[in-house]
């Protein structure tokens, strides 16, 4: 085990955590810590490799180049606690090895700047990054001002992201949700909308992130129209919560698509209307209804719930019946996809990761500062997304659904032809 590079051991721990093979008290915190540790260790090992002129297991050292002599532990403070990392040591060199990342750097190299950006995006504040790049005497290699300048490249990445061409994406499922952020000092939190999609090949992609939206119809309409202007094709299904402004904007901007109401949100709404003593039974019946084998069976189960609880729980029954067709839209799609497309949970988990990272910089007010950090956190948290499996049967089923939706839309928008009145003959007129 000692002959394995430190970064490989860290990578294995990160992989085990992401695959659920690691039992830790706070998995999200450990994810951030391991990601930051991996970045630092890979940079330090790359520096040692360049100094030796050979990879970790390679033989044939040049005279005076030295050899690897284990590791020593370094430490950096972050909002997730102290992060320990392993620094490679090199012995028996004609000239002592001095790390560029640990000793004075005359100029900011591109690799160093990239490392600073990644550390910032993964949850370290500018103060933390400044502490990492300090020599043994405590002299700063990168000032906070320099780090702030470096991380401005995240703003350039964000601007490129929100202006890119979306016509290359063939969207099957589109997910939309919002998160409240403090964009302006002294002002209440404002909603920021995010959209991601599952593509025709099953892969997932973050599509858009836009500020200054209030989840009203006008703001949501502009959010969707911006993606449409950039070439976003029609999805088959749009998944959102029950915000009325979002729903109306979806129906206006994606008339060919079905709409799925997030069932996680719906279940929370139902629970607030049902007494605790009755909730286990009501929850089981509502869940069976929403996850029925077909829309027809779901409606039968819905009618049975209404008949049972209408007298005692009228508000819960009204909530169950509200927007019911949108709650069971996922039942028209391939069985293997239904669990992934009936909620906005994946995007909400992304928001959770984003919150854990942005909390590191509590005074990052202003659209520019908040958005570049939000974008960096979301795009990196989305990297390990696993796609949906798209079998040949699934593809045929999705094609049939698209054909059906196109025909329905054509029928709705077809001009109404009125028959002209039959002229009366001269005999009839008399």
Image (spheres, rainbow, N blue to C red):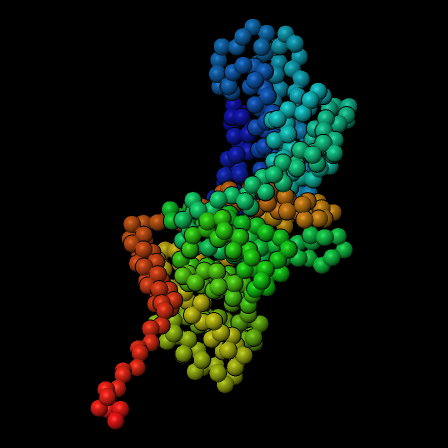
Q: How far across and how far down the image is residue 231, in percent? A: 46, 49
Residue toward you, 143 or 422: 422
Residue 368 placement, left or right of 20:
right
Q: How far across and how far down the image is residue 52, in percent? A: 56, 14
As drawn, 159 above or below 334: above
Residue situated furthest top in the rendering: 63
Image quarter of residue 193: bottom right
Residue toward you, 321 or 257: 257
Residue at 58% from the left image edge and 57% from the top image edge: 178
Residue 3 visible, this angle: yes
Residue situated furthest bottom in the rendering: 430
Residue 41 placement, left or right of 137:
left
Q: How far across and how far down the image is residue 375, in percent? A: 59, 45
Residue at 42% from the left image edge and 75% from the top image edge: 302
Residue toward you, 323 or 68: 323
Residue situated furthest left in the rendering: 427
As drawn, 321 above or below 343: below
Q: How far across and how far down the image is residue 399, in percent? A: 32, 55
Residue at 59% from the left image edge and 32% from the top image edge: 39
Report the quarter where the C terminus lies.
Answer: bottom left
Residue 291 visible, this angle: no
């Amino acid at each position: 085990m000692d002959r394995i590079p430190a970064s490989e051991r860290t990578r294995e721990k990160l992989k085990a955590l992401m695959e659920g093979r690691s039992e830790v008290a706070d998995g999200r915190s450990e994810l951030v810590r391991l990601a930051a540790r991996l970045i630092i260790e890979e940079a330090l090992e790359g520096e040692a490799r360049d100094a030796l002129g050979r990879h970790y297991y390679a033989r044939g050292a040049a005279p005076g180049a030295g050899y690897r002599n284990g590791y020593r532990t370094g430490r950096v403070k972050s909002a997730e606690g102290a992060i320990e990392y392993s620094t490679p040591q090199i012995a028996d060199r004609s000239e002592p090895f001095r790390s560029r990342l640990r000793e004075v750097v005359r100029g900011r190299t591109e690799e160093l700047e990239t490392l600073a950006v990644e550390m910032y995006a993964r949850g370290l504040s500018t103060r933390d990054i400044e502490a990492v790049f300090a020599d043994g005497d405590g002299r700063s290699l990168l000032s906070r001002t320099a780090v702030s300048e470096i991380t401005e490249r995240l703003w350039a990445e964000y601007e490129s992201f929100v202006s890119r061409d979306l016509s290359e994406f063939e969207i099957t499922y589109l997910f939309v949700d919002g998160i409240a952020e403090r964009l302006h000092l002294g002002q209440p939190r404002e909603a920021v909308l995010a959209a991601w999609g599952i593509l025709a090949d099953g892969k997932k992609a973050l599509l858009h992130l836009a500020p200054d939206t209030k989840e009203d119809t006008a703001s949501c309409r502009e959010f969707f129209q911006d993606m449409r202007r950039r070439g976003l094709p029609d999805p088959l299904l749009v998944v959102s919560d029950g915000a009325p402004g979002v729903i109306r904007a979806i129906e206006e901007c994606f008339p060919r698509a079905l709409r799925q109401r997030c069932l996680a949100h719906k279940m929370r709404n139902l629970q607030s209307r049902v007494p605790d003593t009755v909730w286990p039974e009501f929850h089981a019946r509502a869940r069976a209804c929403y996850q029925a084998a077909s829309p027809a069976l779901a409606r039968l189960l819905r009618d049975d719930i209404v008949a049972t609880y209408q007298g005692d729980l009228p508000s819960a029954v009204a909530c169950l019946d509200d927007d019911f067709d949108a709650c069971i839209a996922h039942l028209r799609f391939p069985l293997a996809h239904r669990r992934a497309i009936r909620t906005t949970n994946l995007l909400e988990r992304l928001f959770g990761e984003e919150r854990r990272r942005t909390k590191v910089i509590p005074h990052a007010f202003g659209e520019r500062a908040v958005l570049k950090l939000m974008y960096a956190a979301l795009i990196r948290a989305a990297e390990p997304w696993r796609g949906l499996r798209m079998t040949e049967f699934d593809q045929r089923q999705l094609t049939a659904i698209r054909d059906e939706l196109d025909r329905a839309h054509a029928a709705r928008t077809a001009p109404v032809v009125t028959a002209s009145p039959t002229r009366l003959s001269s005999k009839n007129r008399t």
